[in-house]
Amino acid sequence: MLCGLSFVVVVLATSAAASDSPNIVIMLMDDMGWGDLGSNGEPSRETPHLDQLAREGLTATSMYTAAPLCSPSRAALLTGRLPIRNGFYSNNTHGRNAYTPQNIVGGISASEVLLPELLKTRGYTSGLIGKWHLGHRTPYLPLERGFDYWFGSPNCHFGPYSDVTTPNIPVFRNASMIGRYYKDFAIDRATGVSNMTKMFTEEAVAFIQRQAREGPFFLLWAPDATHAPTYASLKFHGTSRRGRYGDAVRELDAGVGAIVNALRDANVDNNTLVVFTSDNGAALVSKEEGGSNGPFLCGKQTTFEGGMRAPGIFWWPGVIAPGSVTHQVWSQMDLFSTALQLAGITPPHDREMDGLPLAASLFHPDHEFFRPIFLYRGDRLMAVRQGSYKMHVWTWSTPTDELRRGINFCPGSEVANVTTPQPTDHSIAPVLFNVVLLEAMFAHRAKLRRGEPQLNWCDPAVMHWAPPGCEELGECLKVPASNPTLCNWPH
Amino acid sequence: MLCGLSFVVVVLATSAAASDSPNIVIMLMDDMGWGDLGSNGEPSRETPHLDQLAREGLTATSMYTAAPLCSPSRAALLTGRLPIRNGFYSNNTHGRNAYTPQNIVGGISASEVLLPELLKTRGYTSGLIGKWHLGHRTPYLPLERGFDYWFGSPNCHFGPYSDVTTPNIPVFRNASMIGRYYKDFAIDRATGVSNMTKMFTEEAVAFIQRQAREGPFFLLWAPDATHAPTYASLKFHGTSRRGRYGDAVRELDAGVGAIVNALRDANVDNNTLVVFTSDNGAALVSKEEGGSNGPFLCGKQTTFEGGMRAPGIFWWPGVIAPGSVTHQVWSQMDLFSTALQLAGITPPHDREMDGLPLAASLFHPDHEFFRPIFLYRGDRLMAVRQGSYKMHVWTWSTPTDELRRGINFCPGSEVANVTTPQPTDHSIAPVLFNVVLLEAMFAHRAKLRRGEPQLNWCDPAVMHWAPPGCEELGECLKVPASNPTLCNWPH
């Protein structure tokens, strides 16, 4: 078998310590970049708790979101299916990103099966703390789609609005609004101060404290402080080296620490899989209110690495080996399949699933693992990642008219033929990226010692005038004068 | 481990039937293409004996020569080292092919160690029947470099010459010429009739008959009938559907049958590894006197697949499983290392070797096997093949001035940005070829059922004017008239 399509058969190799129905906590950041974590190389020391989580758990370096922006990415995580399958896309125009602003008519389709709906069949209680973004109209809201508890808002915290042409975004507890952003839940746009992360953290801790004694739970912690307009509470305001964005990261990192402590205090840490990730790459378009994608090209809205490579930390004391790392190509849709696998639930088999169950890989992250990941922008398949390779059949960065308005998804990293401002079809000759072949070439070149070239010189005198044995045969010819010249090699 | 640089450790898993010092027969054709074999899909039924050999043995579909033309390719096979290392190149101008015409001054360097020299240390007798091409001057000739027997010529059978400005090419037996092409060893340029293949076959059979009782032998059978000017004996003349070229193939195929029969008759077939291959891709430039590269791009002189992918059949009754196939990336330099491995000889460790020992792969051809192959044109590294991928850092097809003269190494298969008539540096953005990602994409597309898009319609009436719970809070706003429109997605 060459490096190919074949999937390594993943057998559920449960560790002795892995329990039957573990709790599952997914910490899903908003627009946080791969490069925002100290454990991924960010130098500002904003994430001591996440760095500790990585030391105690598994870092997945190649974890992909299912879409380069919020709503379709989250819909895919909760359905285990690509947006192109679960309907979280638009084909009003081809290849354009769509999400769920508050004037959107649609939402997550009733024909889709969501993770909390399935977990409920095995006695799980599910809580969503934070942003929903899968549709804000009945019947799309979280408590109608399997969640038992919700504190947060259905959309981004854009605003403030005057409530005349646009209403402010409501904040819900369970099935009812309990106020609106800016009005009842303050975000100071002038200073960037808000208590929302503090509240989301307290809500998560309280959910764990309530549920730890009640049976298995699924917590989707989805704070949105790193989505512009970024914010932090006064305790963290002005404490980072990266301004408001870094302040937001610091408060979220502290939240991670508080949630992990709550798991420990409730004595369920050895029975809980914690996953830390983000819904898409950092929004470079947000400038100083956007994060870092580390070494990766471009950001949110694009299918380049910076748009869809997300942080990935998996933590489960006693089950996942501390300090382990995997470079396997993982998708956030795998979280759906893995949660079902751990809970002993059969995934839906009446539809095509994109997620794969990762339990064997979590416990044995050095497994070989070849599977293709399909990267869409809207309704258009842009790229395929597999093994160490990524192939773009379409490229598109920032639309030309938006570039003129100062919007740029790839600031400072334009690459000819790649970050094309128009959607560009490369189907005939796809653009391929790889690391391994270049590394092989560099290694070959580095240790190559060239032999002395033997084929530089030509001379008529060396021709077959008088080969050995010619005398006996009487076939010797007269050897002309030597006239060595550099050979002419035309090809 | 991702698909990467790592070499699968190849343990010599000798079959029970594999003996200690097997005989080794390498049948090395001249300019015969991958696509010339019936077993590789050629429809003219010219190769019944080769097709039978493939049925009884192993077909290697991805066997590469070490150079896109004769002399450097053969020098690499016999040294296990790339021409850039063993000196069989020229740097008079960069990236141009060089070989050993009869006015060449150089030859295989005394500092190189040749396969028959090493085999001699374990009692092997080595014979070369056919073309040498590693230098025709003392001390470069075969009997000075480890061969015990030689019948053939040091260069290509170009001619006839008048012996005035250019002497005719001599034919040697052992250390002395025994005549010249055209004069003493007839090749009728008008009819394409010659008995040379017949003689090379009889010589090979006689060598086997002599040596089978004497101990292990190495036979390099290197007839040149498929190198233009192509020829066949009267028995095969005009018998194929492909003219002179097909006639030559038919006679060589019969020669393969005769040699295999000789092994059987001498009762050494179970103790002999037979390899059938060619020194480079078919010479498309030779038009009707050139062969077929099957589906591959371009031909001899180029580093595209058609220039360096060669037929590969491995036959060893009782040891290699009949009808087996491998798609592993193999190099003809591996034949050097494999012969040493089978003979129990340690390869030279004072120099960089490019060949790998294949014994484990011969017996277990489904092993995973990742290794890079470096494809040079002259002194320039053009491409790297690994796994299912090939990366061109340089491209070059036929030089522009030669194209004007009717020379074309890629007739009918020009590909933009790939078959460039000027040497073209792609180091910044290498041209990558692959099969697997495209296959994955096609499979994904073929079975994709798109969900009904949920994000097409927007309507101000659905905004958060009056969310559930607003009445209790006194925060309900007036809902405007419905005005659904297609959402505008700018990104």
Image (tube, coloured by chain):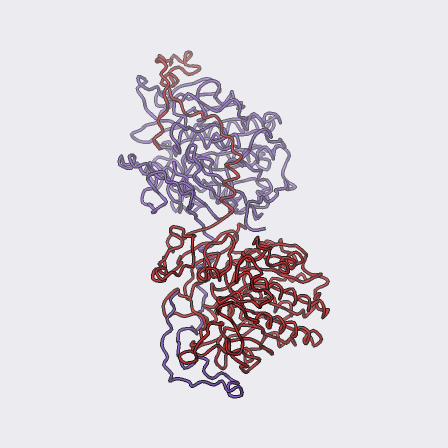
Chain colours: A red, B purple
User: Is A410 displayed left or right of B317 in the figure?
Assistant: left
Q: Nearer the viewer, residue B29 or A3?
A: A3
Residue A75, image x, y percentages: 51, 70
Residue drawn at x 53%, y 58% is A242
Asked if B123 appears above or below A229 in the picture, the reply is above
Q: Is residue B461 above or below residue A95?
A: below
**Residue A93, position as x, y percentages in the image:** 36, 68
Screen quadrant of the C terminus of chain B: bottom left
The quadrant in which residue A427 appears is: bottom left
Front residue of A301/B256: it is A301
Residue shown at the point (45%, 85%) measured from the top left: B477
Would you place residue A78 above or below residue B393 in this image?
below
Q: Is residue A338 left or right of residue A427?
A: right
Percent x, y of residue A244? 52, 63
**Residue A62 higher or lower than A160, as above or below:** above
Tally of marks = 0
Q: Which residue does the image show at 37% across and 26% down from the upper left?
A: B157
Q: Quadrant of residue B243?
A: top left
**Residue A166, horizontal then vertical, whole percent:** 42, 78
